[in-house]
Image (cartoon, rainbow, N blue to C red):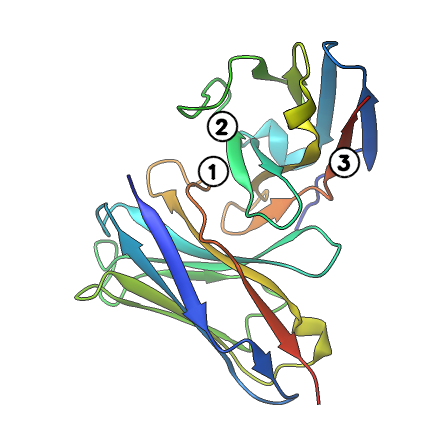
Amino acid sequence: QVQLQQWGARLLKPSETLSLTCGVSGGSFSGFYWTWIRQSPGKGLEWIGEISHREIAPGGTTNYNPSLKSRVTMSTDTSKNQFSLHLTSVTAADTAVYFCTRTPLHARNYFDPWGQGTLVTVSS
Amino acid sequence: SSELTQDPAVSVALGQTVTVTCQGASLRVYYASWYQQKPGQAPTLVFFSGNSRPSGIPDRFSASSSGDTSSLTITGAQAEDEAAYYCGSRDIGGKQVIFGGGTKLTVL
């Protein structure tokens, strides 16, 4: 059974860079878009973006939410079965629970399973 | 871009049937997926690809779609079904993912 375990800094100051990593265990790293989604306190789900394994293109293929695209970078480390999110120049508006998940390349229309979530707080 | 619209809140009596709807232009092109989220937990996939229920999800959960609307139905709602339900799909362009605002289901 595939499990996603995520980790990273939970308290940031404005203008710092958010960095989270998600480890994948119990399943293949290929065949999926690896995805980050966030949820601001008391709010709904916001898709941040996705990255594929290099099977589609060297270095993988990325798609980002246009509202975050200028600040987001995603990467994979297939040797460790991990993928990461970096979000630069954070503000209080980036305070949210961040989830990692995956969607299959052939369907790309559902997410399962999900990581446990990481509450990242941006505060001076 | 496009958006998905859900009713903010719905209630159902214990054991009765309830339907949560999701409306958006992208649903004419892409399947909706449905997620259940309980307080303090990560979302859980409960239905996807039009007619698929993940293993472990009770068969009282079903889904359907018509035109620009997708619906999640719980037949015989149980107390443990009280949660927020989110729909999601690709947007019209297919590169981005969008979610509905969520429906808070209360089981009375």
**Label 3: how many Cα within 10 Å (few below 14, some 14–19, many 20+):** many
Place of residue A82 in the rendered image (x, y in percent of width and height, measured from the top left) = 29, 64
Q: Please tell me whether residue A123 is drawn above or below residue A98 in the rendered image.
A: below
Place of residue A75 in the rendered image (x, y in percent of width and height, measured from the top left) = 34, 70
- Read off the residue under disc 2: B48
Quarter of the N terminus of chain A within the rendering: top left
SS assignment at label 3: strand
**Labels 3 and 1 positioned on one and the same chain:** no
| Real-space Cα separation, disc 2 to disc 3, in angstroms | 19 Å
**Label 1: how many Cα within 10 Å (few below 14, some 14–19, many 20+):** some
Amino acid identity at mark 2: Phe
Residue at screen point 22% across, 65% down: A58
State the count of labels: 3
**Labels 2 and 1 positioned on one and the same chain:** no
Residue lying farthest to the left in this orientation = A79
Amino acid identity at mark 3: Lys
Q: Nearer the viewer, mark 2 or mark 3?
A: 3
Residue A20, by quadrant, is: bottom left
| Real-space Cα separation, disc 2 to disc 1, in angstroms | 8 Å
Residue A7 visible to an observer of this rendering: yes
**Label 2–label 1 contact, CB within 8 A:** yes
Amino acid identity at mark 1: Asn
SS assignment at label 1: loop
- Read off the residue under disc 3: B104
Q: Please tell me whether residue B97 is drawn above or below residue A73 in the rendered image.
A: above
Q: Which chain carries label 3?
A: B
SS assignment at label 2: loop
Instruction: Report the disc number at residue A109.
Output: 1
Task: Locate residue A87 relative to residue A46 in the image: left or right.
Answer: left
